[in-house]
Amino acid sequence: MLVMDEIKPFRIDIPQTDLDDLYDRLRRTRWAAQLPGGWSRGVPVAYLRELAAYWADGFDWRAQETRLNAFPQFTTVIDGQTIHYLHVRSPEPGALPLIMTHSWPNTVAEFLDVIGPLTDPRGHGLDPSVAFHVVAPSLPGFGFSPFPEPADQRPWSIERVARTWAELMSRLGYERYGAQGNDAGALVTPQLAVLAAEHVVGSLITAGLGIPTGKPGELDGASAEELAELEVMAGRMSGGSGYGPYLAARPQTLAYGFADSPVMQLAYLVERFKEFDGWDEPEAEHIARDLVLTNASLYWFTGTGGSSSWTYYDGAAGLPIEQTVVPSGVTHGGPSVLRRIAERGNDLAYWGQAQSPSHMVAMAAPEPLVNGIREFFGTRR
């Protein structure tokens, strides 16, 4: 008999036949001709060929699999959906439970470099009085949380994910915990705070609060320097490839390419990372190649390239909600004008000025993120 609240240990063990198939497909790629315009037309052929060649002949998946399996992993079924998650308990007494929600298009591999310092600060030369039991779930439709077949026809709203996270933390026996997230995770985190306000001690996101929406008076008092910073930020957030509207309208069409061609999946992920970070230095690699390819491999092996786009086709993409029921914090705050806007709709308790060369901050700049998490939650234990 199926026990709906059952928790099962999980270990990543990709069959060798799947690895062999990946390498064969990579080596047999039918490469497109290079169009004029370089990065302005998409990921250049030469760049992608080099990266794909390394994926096939240099990248060590088994080493990354071992690294991921060093963290205890589990699955459980909530609201009809299998949820995979890392659950790493701290050896420190009084550690605060912390649920961390990853980005799109990303996976729990995003947290490989931050879990250790958060759960075992003593072992990483940090003050052991601030420690965490980390719970890092794979979002529904991502990685080892694949959609069932046939897929559930109910939309995966951010609120539905937040309710799932609240149930997960309850199932794990955590009555008091913090919540942190980036990108898609930054949407889930404040929503979880609203739905489980009696349990969440603080909502910390990397960015997204205070983004101007065009309301009258929003930018009153902004200096010329602040307005210039906002203009640069707006330039990065607008235009681009137009992937959002396409995913909202025709995700199934792209899913065929993601499922059949690892190079298509890789190109799409690389383009998203580059586009999010701005095109000023398109050749720059702010995230280690092995981490980029670990992420791509997880999408490929689990076949979740298409299903991970639900934030767009289910209308869940956007900005984090404002809420005042739980204290909020932002690690990568940006211009002061954003803080002033954010303060109007949030109980803003922390506005960090951490820096990252990439939108995927946990992968590109883990240390400042760890510091921000420790600063914010260190006073909310």
Image (cartoon, helix red, strand yellow):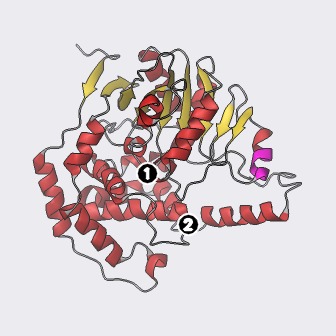
Residue at x 79% of width, y 52% of height: 337
Q: Nearer the viewer, residue 208 or 91?
A: 91
Reply yes or no: does residue 202 show up in magenta.
Answer: no
Whether residue 261 sits left or right of residue 165 in the image: it is left
Q: Amino acid at mark 2?
A: Gly
Q: Within the image, what quadrant is residue 283 found in?
A: bottom left
Image location (x, y in percent) of residue 194: 63, 27
Q: Secondary structure at mark 1?
A: loop
User: In whole angstroms, how far apart are the C-alphas of marks 2 and 1?
Assistant: 16 Å
Stretch of the chain drawn in magenta: 336-341
Task: Determine which of the numbered discs, if any, sits on residue 105 in the image.
Answer: 1
Image location (x, y in percent) of residue 13: 18, 39
Image location (x, y in percent) of residue 319: 63, 46
Q: Within the image, what quadrant is residue 78 found in?
A: top left
Q: Residues within 10 Å of mark 1 (few under 14, many from 20)?
A: many
Mark whose residue sits in front, 2 or 1: 2
Q: Circle 2 is placed at which residue position? A: 278
